[in-house]
């Protein structure tokens, strides 16, 4: 595994405040696909459906329709918008508000929660694992939120004052959403409701990453988050006003719709493996914006470290041979390839 060595890196907000121009390390190399679809060029919107979470586990006709909608969207895009998830719009607004307030604090205040070298948890830049890593235009606060005994509260902001208790509450609410969604996913594949939950194990973890993309002087040359597939299933709250998130399909980028009050759920690499490739982990990226800052909140649902992840038995057959090896601690090994712009899931292909 690669190690992070440098003492301390400036956050993007610090780079902007220093007003010393755009450091070269943020500039993307010119490549052929940049000419087809320039970073700041127009992109079509993707046509993902909204899935009614409250219907997924209903045995009614409506429930069956919702499952087939889910099946076709996850086979096509690997990501859906989820509505009627049981979290109020007022509560989601509070999450957005607290995220904005945290990143608007003075540097010294945020640095109280700074991550340590070589560790993802805490506030700061993304990990920088090599001298030639091209940097993303993003600052983030990364916290393990579940189970409780894995929380490191020293990284949890005490200002804004409601941050901690709200994050606790959000975690429990998300936990309920994930449980229902994983059961619905299993049902949509004609599997027993609990297969995915069991594969995640009793010590499944949740990590929440609060993302802040400051306005960027060169949206044509700099990227907010480089193309990647998420390691595991993700619940995402994209910014309610500012676009930027894009998904790749058949070599073309599409922008994610903005739909307040919904949660975007992304299958992630491990679910692709468990579903034997029926549901694809979508490659996505975030482009920057010249005028506006953008925020988002992503929660990753990580299986227990002792769990071996492999395609579910019921999805392997002569007609559909097993596509992936068994993997363990995938997410822990994931960051190295992520920062090199590689696709870690390719290493799991048979
Ligand atoms: C992520 C991610 C998208 C966004 O954190 O993995 O893809 O909209 N975020 O910020
Ligand atoms: Ni992502």
Image: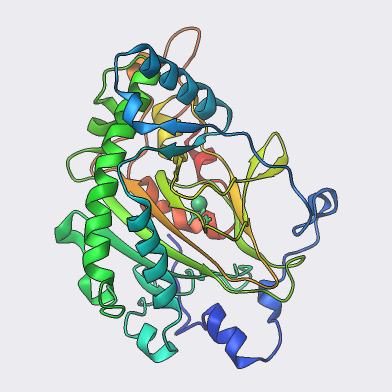
Residue 255 image offset from top left, x and y in percent: 65, 47
Q: Is residue 290 above or below residue 191?
A: below
Q: Is residue 204 above or below residue 338?
A: above
Residue 32 lies left or right of residue 185; in this view the side is right
Q: Can you see residue 267?
A: no
Q: Is residue 197 above or below residue 60?
A: below
Q: Quadrant of the N terminus?
A: bottom left
Residue 230 image offset from top left, x and y in percent: 47, 47
For the point 66% across and 65% down, which residue is it? 288
Residue 139 image offset from top left, x and y in percent: 50, 72
Quadrant hosting residue 214: bottom right
Residue 287 image offset from top left, x and y in percent: 66, 60
Q: Can you see residue 161?
A: yes
For the point 41% across and 52% down, which residue is it? 333
Residue 111 lies left or right of residue 206; in this view the side is right
Residue 346 lies left or right of residue 158; in this view the side is right
Quadrant hosting residue 185: top left
Q: Nearer the viewer, residue 91 or 216?
A: 91
For the point 26% across and 22% down, which residue is it? 193
């Amino acid at each position: 595994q690669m190690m992070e060595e440098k003492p301390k890196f400036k956050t993007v907000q610090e780079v902007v405040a220093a007003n010393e121009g755009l450091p070269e390390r943020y500039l993307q190399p010119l490549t052929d696909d940049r000419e087809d679809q320039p970073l700041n060029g127009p992109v079509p919107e993707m046509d993902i459906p909204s899935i009614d979470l409250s219907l997924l586990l209903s045995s009614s006709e409506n429930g069956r329709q919702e499952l087939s909608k889910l099946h076709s969207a996850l086979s096509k895009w690997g990501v859906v918008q989820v509505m009627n998830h049981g979290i109020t719009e007022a509560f989601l607004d509070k999450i957005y508000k607290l995220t904005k307030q945290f990143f608007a604090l003075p540097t010294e205040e945020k640095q109280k929660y700074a991550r340590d070298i070589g560790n993802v948890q805490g506030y700061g830049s993304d990990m920088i694992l090599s001298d030639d890593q091209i940097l993303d235009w993003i600052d983030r606060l990364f916290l393990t939120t579940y189970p409780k005994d894995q929380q490191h509260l020293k990284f949890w902001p005490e200002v804004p004052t409601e941050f901690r208790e709200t994050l606790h509450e959000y975690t429990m609410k998300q936990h309920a959403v994930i449980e229902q969604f994983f059961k619905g996913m299993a049902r949509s594949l004609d599997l027993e409701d609990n297969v995915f939950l069991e594969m995640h194990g009793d010590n499944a973890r949740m990590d929440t990453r609060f993302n802040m993309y400051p306005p960027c002087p060169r949206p044509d040359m700099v990227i907010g988050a480089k193309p990647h597939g998420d390691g595991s299933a993700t619940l995402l709250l994209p910014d309610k006003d500012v676009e930027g998130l894009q998904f790749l399909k058949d070599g073309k980028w599409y922008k994610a719709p903005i739909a307040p009050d919904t949660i975007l759920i992304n299958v992630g690499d491990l679910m692709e493996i468990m579903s034997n490739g029926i549901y694809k982990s979508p490659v996505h990226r975030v482009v920057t914006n010249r005028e506006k800052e953008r925020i988002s909140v992503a929660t990753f649902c990580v299986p227990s470290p002792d769990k071996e992840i492999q395609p579910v038995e019921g999805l392997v057959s002569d007609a559909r041979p097993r596509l992936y090896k068994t993997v363990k601690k995938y997410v822990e090994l994931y960051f190295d390839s992520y920062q090199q712009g590689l696709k870690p899931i390719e290493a799991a292909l048979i």
